[in-house]
C-alpha cells in the first residue's frame, strides 16, 4: 500500500497542468559546507524556495539532470546526478567536499515555490567526477546493501519454519 506521501505526490503529478512541469531541486550537504546548497533546474535566476519545515532558502539557478535508479539485464543501475556549468559558481564548493555528499531531491510544481510535491532523502553521492564544465556522480542510499529485506527481523515467533526444531 502506498504511503500518504506517495499518494500525495502521485495526485500532484497526475493533476498538474501540462504547462506547469515539476521543477526539480537538489540539496547538497557535507560537513565542509557552512550550510546546505540548493540547486533548481529550469529557471534563469536564483529564487527563494520554502522547504517542508517552513524554512526559506535560496536555490541557485543551475542546469542539472537527475536519473532515477533502474534495472538492466546485468542488474540494477544506480541513480545519477549530473550538474552542468560547475566551473564558475559551484566548483569551489565541490572542491571543499572531501567526504561523501548527502543529497536530497525535491520537486516543486511549476512556479509554486512553497509546496514540495516530491522528496527523496537519504541519498549519498559517490564516485564523483569533475570535468571542465560538469560534475557527475552516482547516487546511492546509505548502506542499503547491508539492510535486511523486507526490513523485518527473522525470529522464531514470526517465522517458526526457519528454525530446526
Image: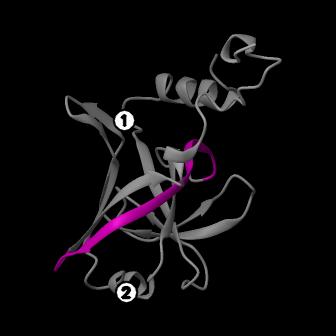
Depicted 79 relative to depicted 16: above or below? below
Write the residue at 40% across / 70% down. 45
Q: Which residue is mark 1?
A: 19
The residue closer to the viewer here, 87 or 94, is: 94
**In the rendered image, which quarter is residue 158 located in?**
top right
Check disc 1 and report its element: helix, strand or loop: loop
Q: Position of residue 108 (x, y in %)?
A: 52, 47
Depicted 97 relative to depicted 145: above or below? below
> What is the distance, in whole Å, between disc 1 and disc 2 at their CAs?
37 Å
Q: Which residue is mark 2?
A: 95
Magenta residues, start to end: 114-133
Q: Position of residue 38 (x, y in %)?
A: 50, 67
Write the residue at 43% across / 51% down. 24
Name the quadrant of the N terminus.
top right
Which residue in the rendered view is the most extreme toward the front? 165
Q: Please state if 89 lies on the left or on the right of 163 as rendered.
A: left
**In the rendered image, which quarter is residue 135 located in?**
bottom left
- Label 1 crowding class (10 Å Cα cut-off): few <14, some 14-19, many 20+? few
Find residue 112 and name its label: none
Amino acid at each position: 500500500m502506498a504511503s500518504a506521501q506517495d499518494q500525495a505526490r502521485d495526485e500532484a503529478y497526475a493533476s498538474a497542468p501540462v504547462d506547469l512541469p515539476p521543477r526539480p531541486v537538489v540539496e547538497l550537504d557535507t560537513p565542509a559546507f557552512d550550510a546546505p546548497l540548493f540547486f533548481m533546474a529550469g529557471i534563469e535566476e536564483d529564487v527563494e524556495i520554502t522547504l517542508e519545515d517552513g524554512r526559506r532558502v535560496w536555490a541557485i539557478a543551475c542546469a542539472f539532470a537527475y536519473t532515477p535508479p533502474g534495472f538492466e539485464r546485468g542488474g540494477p543501475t544506480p541513480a545519477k546526478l549530473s550538474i552542468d556549468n560547475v566551473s564558475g559558481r559551484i566548483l569551489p564548493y565541490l572542491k571543499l567536499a572531501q567526504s561523501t555528499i548527502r543529497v536530497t531531491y525535491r520537486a516543486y510544481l511549476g512556479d509554486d515555490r512553497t509546496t514540495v510535491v516530491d522528496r527523496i532523502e537519504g541519498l549519498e553521492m559517490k564516485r564523483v567526477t569533475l570535468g571542465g564544465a560538469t560534475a557527475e556522480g552516482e547516487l546511492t542510499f546509505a548502506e542499503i546493501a547491508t539492510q535486511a529485506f523486507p526490513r523485518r527481523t527473522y525470529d522464531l515467533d514470526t517465522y517458526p519454519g526457519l528454525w530446526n526444531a
